[in-house]
Amino acid sequence: MAISQSDAVQAQNPQLIDGQVTKIDESAGKFTIKHGPIKKFDMDGMTMVFQAQDPAMLKSVKAGDKVKFDLEKIKGQFTVTKIERAK
């Protein structure tokens, strides 16, 4: 089966997840994010606590910010691997 060009682009630039930061816990290195559906984990929209891959990410956003983020499961924990303020 051939991979379409849009699938190839999708693989290189995964769809970011829409969300809103509700809390940041710098001492624990975690965000609480209210998010929309996460297709790659077959997850409905909800509010969850996520580990930050890099503690510097916690300083890039604040509670109340609308964000776009990416997520991976690392060592059994859902971990934010990229986060940016939504434009």
Image (cartoon, rainbow, N blue to C red):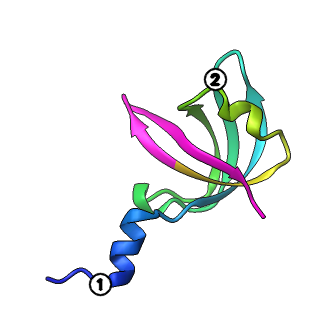
Does 74 appear in magenta? Answer: yes
Tell me if mark 1 has few (under 14), some (14-19) or many (20+) residues whose alpha carbon lies within 10 angstroms of its own: few
Relative depth, front residue between 85 and 71: 85
Q: Residue at x 67, y 29 (%)?
A: 56
| Percent position of residue 5, x then y | 34, 83
Give the CA distance from mark 2 to mark 1: 38 Å
Relative depth, front residue between 42 and 72: 72
Residue that mark 1 sits on: 4
Tell me if mark 2 has few (under 14), some (14-19) or many (20+) residues whose alpha carbon lies within 10 angstroms of its own: some
| Percent position of residue 46, x then y | 64, 52
Q: From which residue to which does the magenta span run?
A: 71-87
Residue that mark 2 sits on: 29
| Percent position of residue 70, x then y | 53, 51
Q: Amino acid at mark 2?
A: Gly
Is the stretch drawn in magenta largely helix, strand or loop?
strand
Q: Residue at x 29, y 84 (%)?
A: 4
